[in-house]
Image (spheres, rainbow, N blue to C red):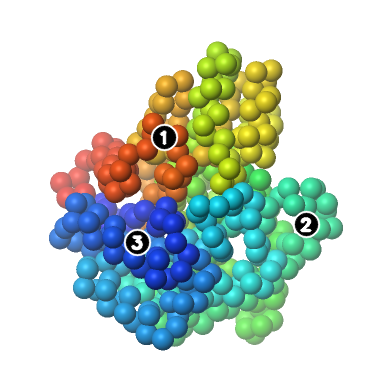
Amino acid sequence: MKIGTDNIHLTYCTNIHPGESWSEVFANLKQYIPVLKLRLSPENPFGIGLRLANIAAKELLERDNLAQFQSWLTAQNLYVFTLNGFPYGEFHHQVVKDAVYSPDWSKIERLDYTINLAKILAALLPQGIDGGISTLPISYKPWWKGEVSAENHIFNSSCLHLASLTAELINLRQQTGKLIHLDIEPEPDGLLENTAEVIDFFTNWLLPVSGAILAQSLGISPKLAEAQLLEHIRICYDTCHFAVEYEDPATVFALFQESGIKIGKIQLSAAIKVALPANREVLLSRLRPFAESTYLHQVIERYPDGSLHHYPDLVTALPYLEQSKAQEWRTHFHVPIFIHDYQVLQSTQDDIVAVLQLLQANPVCQHLEIETYTWDVLPQEMKIDLLASIQREYEWVLQTGLEIQPQPAFIS
């Protein structure tokens, strides 16, 4: 689905559907996508945000699976423009927690997996638009516990692999004419979790270290190597993640632009926020159902002086709620984006609205992906039919966009 006069591509991430093999992924696509297209974009192309685990990516590249998939896309008037390459392995119906960061970018397995995704996207991507692959924020910070030598090793190894990936993306562009970029996704407790850490990584690691490797391997100037890195390595701006970090979207956009860092994809998602003080017993009872055992739900509390304190997971944070002197808690739990208030809880929906407003004035990114992957683990009273939920999220985004800047033909 393309929206607006700037051809902004809107999709939802299929990581919400369980299934790691290609046959399971394809079955989910056949079940949900044609129905959604009929309801939301019956006459026009409909975009897919495809999530492929490592096993599915390998299987899709075997035999004629990719050609068959492309034929199905063409017949259904569908197209793929973005992939989710963050979770490498299983993502549903088991404990995921910090395993979602493994293998990290210091491991060759992460590079090989992402190269496979790039080959798939190069084959599927329509001519005339760029394609993005979102990925983890290099590694998981608590694994290294602030050990400088360990972090330096992770950054060095990751820069080597990112240089190799960039060389592969340059080669794919020369062969196919298609621009594909890796979109690094900062999030709480990631090795890159906020704007300052992203800019520091690009300035002190990616451009000098990966740049030198890329310049030498391709026989190009350091300046050209840096330009290629900035073209092919971008940021996935997840509205939930940056909201949990208490970062203002307009400020983040401006700082990235000043640093020459591009945003390759924007994921539209909302976090839980609660204002303190309040009735702590009631808050505790409302938050407990969100402290589930599948995913990490990092909590960041903000104090009146603006200082922040991190908890690695909601389940570890809750015992401190009653005595906390903080002003506000924000929790990394992707709640439905059409919900602003839920009993005594609120969401960071306002940040999504702010981002959509920014894009109207300054379309720095053309890829929007709705990413509420938590439908299976939401409290029971928040669950409704999955297809209806996805449709409702699309409609909220489209209605919000229409309210921002009315257009006679918003879907084109």
Which quadrant of the view contains residue 163?
bottom right
Question: Label 2: which residue?
Answer: 151
Is there CB contact under 8 Å for labels 3 and 1? no
Of labels 3 and 2, earlier in sequence is: 3
Of 62 and 78, the residue lying toward us: 62
Q: Residue at x 30, y 43 (%)?
A: 385
Q: Nearer the viewer, mark 1 or mark 2?
A: 1
At mark 1, the secondary structure is helix
Is there CB contact under 8 Å for labels 1 and 2? no
Is there CB contact under 8 Å for labels 3 and 2? no
The amino acid marked with disc number 2 is Glu
The amino acid marked with disc number 3 is Asn
Residue 144 percent location from the top left of the image: 78, 52
The amino acid marked with disc number 1 is Gln
Of labels 3 and 1, earlier in sequence is: 3
Disc 3/disc 1 C-alpha distance (Å):
23 Å
- Return the mark for residue 28: 3
Question: Label 1: which residue?
Answer: 380
Of 297 and 246, the residue lying toward us: 297
Disc 1/disc 2 C-alpha distance (Å):
40 Å
Q: Residues within 10 Å of mark 1 (few under 14, many from 20)?
A: few
